[in-house]
Amino acid sequence: MTDTQGPDAERTDTDSELGEAEAVEQVDYETDEARVAALRAGLGDYELDDEDAALLELAEEGPDAIRVMPALPVLAIVGRPNVGKSALVNRILGRREAVVEDTPGVTRDRVSYKAEWNGRRFTLVDTGGWEPDARGIDRSVALQAEIAVELADAVLFVVDVNVGPTSTDEHVVRMLRQSNRPVILVANKSDDTRRDMEASSLWSLGLGEPRPVSAVHGRGVADLLDLAMEALPEISAVAKEELGGPRRVALLGRPNVGKSSLLNKAAGEERVVVNEIAGTTRDPVDEQIELGGRVWRFVDTAGIRRRVHLQQGADFYATLRTQAALEKAEVAVVLLDVTEPLSEQDVRIVDLVLESGRALVLAFNKWDQLDDERRRYLEREIEQDLAHVDWAPRVNISARTGRHLEKLVPALETALDSWDTRIPTGKLNAFIAELIAAHPHPLRGGKQPRILFATQASTRPPTFVLFTTGFLDPQYRRFIQRRLREDYGFEGSPIVVNMRVREKRSRRT
């Protein structure tokens, strides 16, 4: 009968009187530790890999052992359309991940992949999304490269050796020279020694020695990666977690929602000038602002604007700017204009925050202009479009007048505290045991997967790993996430529940 009940059934009276976390609090510390030791010993019967062992070692070091995973260095691949960037990504990854077609502009998103070379792990970023607009393509390519470079520790600039240097390439090079990032010039589609000779023409770009490769055939890629590893730092200088100092806040939202007004009002002066002229290279400026008796570092995102020469591609570039801000922030304040219906772009920005793993606060701006009729529609829109982030603190403000701006501070503090929260391994396993006892996983095919051990792998955001004997239904994983929120809070922070399905060791006679 377990199947019909399911994890989403209403909580019983006993449940409501005593939540799993409260029951866990009553467990004696020594009993709690003994439980963890027994569960940990039981994992010895299962096949574990090196990553499992490292994770378990960290879990044993105590509640303050795991704070932040070191940020992997970032290697970006840029270049004009159809030079073979995605083919090079696939070759480096050793699998077909990026979409490859013989058509310019196939890559529609900035996509990150985890990669490894000679024992070095790094993040590989594939870029694209240029509009095939003859009038604006040069600027589009340069802007894309500018954003990719902002978010990278080193850059592979890919040029088609069969075409040679073009005016578009030279447009990008001017920006790359000012970036202060290591740039490796890649002469792609060099399938033989004759093509290698033709690569010499790329010296004219002024980026040093061209490195001939063939992404399709793999020729020269190993040597290229060796060079890239020399250029990359051990820990990312652009995406690294900074411990201590003012907490970093990104103001996000679609154009004209009030980001610059909020930043100026918080600062008490005109700090941000929004410039929509295409071709203006913007250096992001972080503002130190005192608000609510604390100093905060607000990440300037005024650059998330609609560019005049990038018609239907504008949303793509706004998304990139949003990602750039999130890379540097700890918590995101997403501004929403209450005088207009919630848009697909609003929801997309919220989802970008979720994907980034940053803490989240929703700020409903222009609240002083809200009438009763619009308020009713707004509540429906929130229930429909923002139900998946009902855990995020909501603040009603007016950026123009500064009304209720002080309410932002407790919301930010709550979200950041949740983002930093760690549950000790003992308490987490006792919580999971109570949860399973009250609501077992439904039977599937006559079998019931068991949770062998649970640990919190990291904070920022809180990330939990469950060692299991079988695959947990997505519904059951969501149930665990919901109960973690109900009993431990996590208001304003995404939480991640990952699984490691492990099989028993085969017994040898």
Image (spheres, helix red, strand yellow):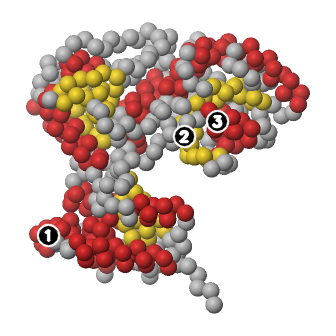
Q: Residue furthest bottom?
A: 509
Image coordinates for residue 212, horizontal then vertical, percent: 78, 30
- Say what secondary structure mark 2 lies in: loop
**Which numbered marker is on residue 18?**
1
Residue visible at 43% across and 78% down in the picture: 42
Q: Amino acid at mark 3?
A: Glu
Quarter of the rendering containing residue 487: bottom left
Q: Amino acid at mark 2?
A: Glu
Residue visible at 80% across and 23% down in the picture: 199
Decide which of 197, 110 is in the foreground and name it.
197
Q: Report crowding for label 3: few under 14, some 14 to 19, many 20 or more residues within 10 A (C-alpha).
A: few
Decide which of 340, 38 is in the foreground and name it.
38
Circle 3 sits on which residue? Answer: 230
Q: Earlier in the sequence, mark 1 or mark 2?
A: 1
- Inter-mark Cα distance, 1 to 2: 47 Å
Quarter of the rendering containing residue 100: top right
Kindly tell me whether residue 414 is visible in this rendering.
yes
Kindly tell me whether residue 251 is visible in this rendering.
no
- Say what secondary structure mark 1 lies in: loop
Circle 2 sits on which residue? Answer: 234
Dots 3, 2 in contact, CB < 8 A: no
Instruction: Assign the N terminus to one quadrant of the image.
Output: bottom left
Q: Residue furthest top?
A: 277
- Inter-mark Cα distance, 3 to 2: 10 Å
Q: Earlier in the sequence, mark 1 or mark 3?
A: 1
Image coordinates for residue 183, horizontal then vertical, percent: 63, 25
Q: Amino acid at mark 1?
A: Leu
